[in-house]
Image (tube, grey):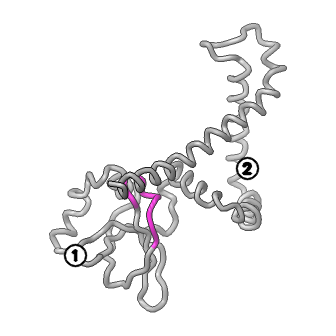
Amino acid sequence: MVKFLKTTMIGGIVFMVPIIIFIAIIGKAIKLTNKLAAPVSALIPVDAIGNIPVADLLALVIILLICFLAGLAAKSTLARKSLSNLESRVFSKIPVYGFVKSKVDAIVQPEKAEGMKPVLAQFDDYWQIAFEVERIPGETVTIFLPGAPDPWSGSVCYVTEDRIQPLELTLLPVLKTLKGLGKGSNEQLRAYLKKGL
């Protein structure tokens, strides 16, 4: 019981950290853009629209516009290289950055998780859905064992090739099954189970 409470609590913290950071960043961004929006909102004859202050709405529009322009800039090769350099030289030294970035990427663009091939990994008398990350010379495979319902919370381990069964599945349905605590396994794994794995 204590172990269950402990793992559930840790899972909750891991799940909440990126959400709290995201909310904090948005809150700070709205405060900063409010300073720009306040003079403009003074020129508008109404103070609020639907109980929301005009200054806050203008601040939100400014944030969305900045995000849109940043998205356009991000498509350029120069911007991608600059961001990559910044990440490797500065952000990578911040312990939480890699964790938060991977969580945000997983939420916003789960289909772009590079090199993550769904597989079944054998452990003694049971199998577990895993993601093959890379192959190591000497018939060793690096795999990520996802958790459920948060598939991006898990562990990394190394197994021999003979313990891996590749799945001809895309990443998104596998993630959906993990988030659903196994619901959908029958449809996805029936063919593999019939083969006796």
Quadrant containing the C terminus is bottom left
Q: Is residue 36 above or below residue 23?
A: above
Q: Is residue 6 above or below residue 190?
A: above
Task: Name the residue rendered at 44%, 75% in the picture.
Answer: 157
The one of 142 and 190 positioned closer to us in this rendering: 142
The one of 148 and 168 positioned closer to us in this rendering: 148
**Label for residue 40?**
none
Residue at the limit of the structure toward the right, as seen here: 39
| x, y percent for residue 5 | 38, 51
Can residue 154 be found in the magenta stretch?
Answer: yes
Residue type pointed to by label 2: Ala
Can residue 192 be found in the magenta stretch?
Answer: no
Tell me: 71 left or right of 106: right
Q: Which image quadrant is residue 75 in?
A: bottom right
Task: Name the residue rendered at 41%, 56% in the picture.
Answer: 7
Q: Which residues are magenta?
A: 147-156
Q: Nearer the viewer, mark 2 or mark 1?
A: 1
Q: Tell me the distance, in whole angstroms, between the alpha carbons under discs 2 and 1.
A: 51 Å
Residue at the limit of the structure toward the bottom, as seen here: 138
Q: Is residue 77 visible?
A: no
Count of picture labels: 2
| x, y percent for residue 130 | 37, 68
Residue type pointed to by label 1: Asp
**Label for residue 125?**
1
Q: Which residue is mark 2?
A: 73
How would you rate the neighbour count of disc 2 (Cα within 10 Å): few for under 14, some for 14-19, many for 20 or more? few
Q: Which image quadrant is residue 196 in?
A: bottom left
Q: Secondary structure at mark 1?
A: loop
